[in-house]
Image (cartoon, rainbow, N blue to C red):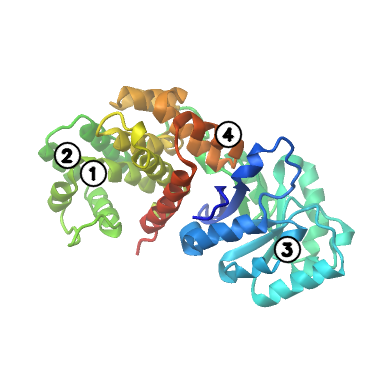
Amino acid sequence: MSQEKFFLGRQPILDREQQIIGFELLFRSAESLLRANISDSFQASASVIVNALADFGTREVLGRHKGYFNVNLEMLMSDALELLPKGQVVIELLENIEVNAEVVGRCRDLKRLGFALALDDHVYNAVWEPLYPLIDIVKVDILQNTGASMAETLAPLKRWPFKFLAEKVEAAEQYAFCVEHGFELFQGYYFAHPVVLKQNRVDIAQLTLTKLLEQVLMDVELREIEETFKQNPNLTYNLLRLVNSVAIGLRERIKTLRHALMVLGLQQLKRWIMLALFASKSVHGVFSPLLEIAATRGKLMELLVKKQPALIVDPDFSDRAFMTGVLSLVDSLFEVSMTEMVRQLNLADDIRRALLNRDGTLGALLQLIEKLEQADFAGVDLLLRQTGIDHDHLLRAQMETINWTNGLTNMV
């Protein structure tokens, strides 16, 4: 580990098919949070980003996704930028960079090396025209451009073959609005918010999965669980495929339902059922953004508990932490209120309180994960101190989680 401590946030970037194709990686030096006046307009210094990648490795930080990095003028001109993997990186130029011949020349060199370039939070300005032919992606803050103003914002930029990326998309209605205006990429958690707070029609596979989840939570006999699976052959196939595709420390691949049930046991089965719920809901299967974010939440909460023994109140606590993280998006999965979902499931009291009110240790851990997703690093720092979690433990848990989630979604 580098002596310079830092926080890492990842915000998802999706395409029109609503698949996650990248993450904006937001770094902040831990020491910077201690300063009363943080005037930096960029997320981190070049040294923080380079140290992060050197400590953990690019593949571990990015997984299978592209990484979007904010850079200010200092970092843009730094040789350290060229240490980033050009095929997996999008360099975002912050809006306060002053365009001059030196900046244009540097961007031309980076393009020649194979880097993709983006303009962050951009509005057309004639002074940027010398740079526009080198730009691949233009990011637009949709909260600053609503209604007719969006068309006015985009019109002068459409003279160039940019891909437009909508920032701060937090609702399905905003996503539809952006699609209508020609956006191809979207940044935000619009996919993780229920469209309506009423029970939608749930198909047979989802009903079966919900029944299975209740059965394993209630510790029913294995034969009852097997019988439930037998009622839906397609679900049986999908679950076997999911289990076979994820490394679970077995020497042989699972080939039958009974084999899966016996080898996995109820604890692991419970986890895969929760993940299969998300996969079954989406037309993208295991590439569902809900699955990826829910799995990330669950695994990170589990690892935070395991890496901080003082948090473990009983032998099952890390498992309950995993469940809390995964189930924190189940309201979005079924487009129903969390209160209604919790009412239907036989959950432990501490999981209920965490999901409904963010109470207790599990609630604090869930808040910590949510603050990381929002890149609210001051909030992360506060919750680390409240829970007693070591900063280095958080970083190691994040890297392990990214690797695990990448393995989960890289199915053949």
Q: CA distance from mark 2 to mark 3?
A: 57 Å
Which numbered disc covers residue 76? 3
Q: CA distance from mark 4 to mark 1?
A: 34 Å
Q: CA distance from mark 2 to mark 4?
A: 42 Å
The crowd level at tag 4 (other Cα within 10 Å; few <14, some 14-19, many 20+) is: some
Report the residue at 49% width, 63% height from top: 57
Q: Is residue 195 left or right of residue 397?
A: right
Q: Earlier in the sequence, mark 3 or mark 4?
A: 3
Tag 4 residue:
379
Residue 283 visible at all:
no
Q: Earlier in the sequence, mark 3 or mark 1?
A: 3
Q: Is residue 208 left or right of residue 383?
A: left
The crowd level at tag 2 (other Cα within 10 Å; few <14, some 14-19, many 20+) is: some
* Whether label 3 touches label 4, CB < 8 Å: no
Across and down, in percent, residue 339 comes to 42, 23
Across and down, in percent, residue 55 comes to 50, 59
Q: Amino acid at mark 2?
A: Ile
Tag 2 residue:
225
- Mark 4 or 1: in front is 4
- Judging from the image, what secondary structure is the residue with disc 3 in? helix
Q: Amino acid at mark 1?
A: Leu
Quadrant hosting residue 38: top right
Quadrant hosting residue 145: top right
Report the residue at 32% width, 22% height from top: 349
Q: Amino acid at mark 3?
A: Leu
Q: Residue furthest bottom?
A: 112
Tag 1 residue:
269
- Quadrant where the C terminus is found in the figure: bottom left
- Mark 2 or 4: in front is 4
* Whether label 1 touches label 2, CB < 8 Å: yes
- Mark 2 or 3: in front is 3
